[in-house]
Amino acid sequence: MTRPLFEHLNELAETFAGAFPIWLGTDFDGTLTHHQDDPAGVELPDEMRVKLDRIARHPRFAVAVVSGRSLDDLLPRIGMAELAYAGNHGMEIEAQGLSWIDPEASRHKDLVGAFADVVGEFIRAVPGARIEDKRLSLAIDYRPCSPAVRQAIVGRLDSTIDRFPALRLRHAALGSEVLPRSGANKGTAARVLRDHQVGGEGVAIYLGDDLTDEDAFRALPNAITVHVGGRDTAARFRIESADSVGLFFDWLVRVTQSG
């Protein structure tokens, strides 16, 4: 069962006492920021930027952001060179001394574009719905739409995917992803970045709110995994919102300074 994080901080303080290194992996949307109806308008809040920068500069920490956004989209929104990054749900990685794109995803990016061509006109005709071509994947956002409209969009996507056997669909409550049938995901990216940044040593933390973050929770069974949103998941702990993430970051700085 996923336990409330803030009820177990005393227990976790013992884990951090003297721990070195500490790897912190985090999702972006819904974790470092609040979700918005228009994903293009999401920015890293100044207060969170200060907290993240403080941790990234801490001598005991290495930090990575693992996002569903493409790296071309994600990197300008954060702009911290000392961080490592994974985009497109782990299909592309950029870190100091490491630059990688999943070859299977690269082979099928034309198919991703073809899928967008087939469904794009339908999606763009729906008020409030959006389709984003991230080169290696597609994001279809229907957050502002009614449940009936969301169901119609999902039905169109389901009926179309059968024509693209090299691609797969992942549905969440308010959006869908079209991805290649690749072995890369947020879980594989989290392990690669943890090993690259800290050699797999020390304590690992991972926070995320999205369905695709479940891959990272499962891939890091010994880490302090935290679901942002308050429900039971594969994560060990849960907190309520991005505001709570900021409070946790403040606590991390305090406990590692005194540990």
Image (cartoon, rainbow, N blue to C red):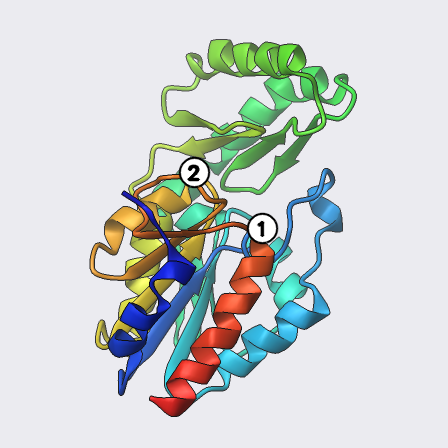
- Identity of the residue drawn at 26% across and 62% down: 223
Q: Amino acid at mark 1?
A: Asp
> Which residue sits at x=30%, y=52%?
236
Q: Position of residue 134 (x, y in %)?
A: 58, 42
Quadrant, the C terminus? bottom left
Q: Quadrant of residue 96?
A: bottom left
| Mark 2 secondary-structure assignment | loop
Q: Would you say residue 91 is visible in this rendering?
A: no
Q: Amino acid at mark 2?
A: Leu
Residue in the image at 49% along x and 55% along y: 27
Q: Is residue 10 above or below residue 165?
A: below
In the shown orientation, is residue 40 left or right of residue 4? right
**Residue at 71% of width from left, 58% of height from top?**
43
- The tag earlier along the polypeptide, 1 or 2, is 1
Residue 175, image x, y percentages: 57, 29
Instruction: Name the foreground residue: 226 vs 108.
Output: 226
Q: Nearer the viewer, residue 149 or 7?
A: 7
Q: Which mark is residue 231?
A: none
Asked if residue 77 is positioned above or below residue 79 in the image, the reply reads above
Q: Residues within 10 Å of mark 2 (few under 14, many from 20)?
A: some
Residue where numbered disc 2 is placed: 211
Q: Is residue 10 visible?
A: yes
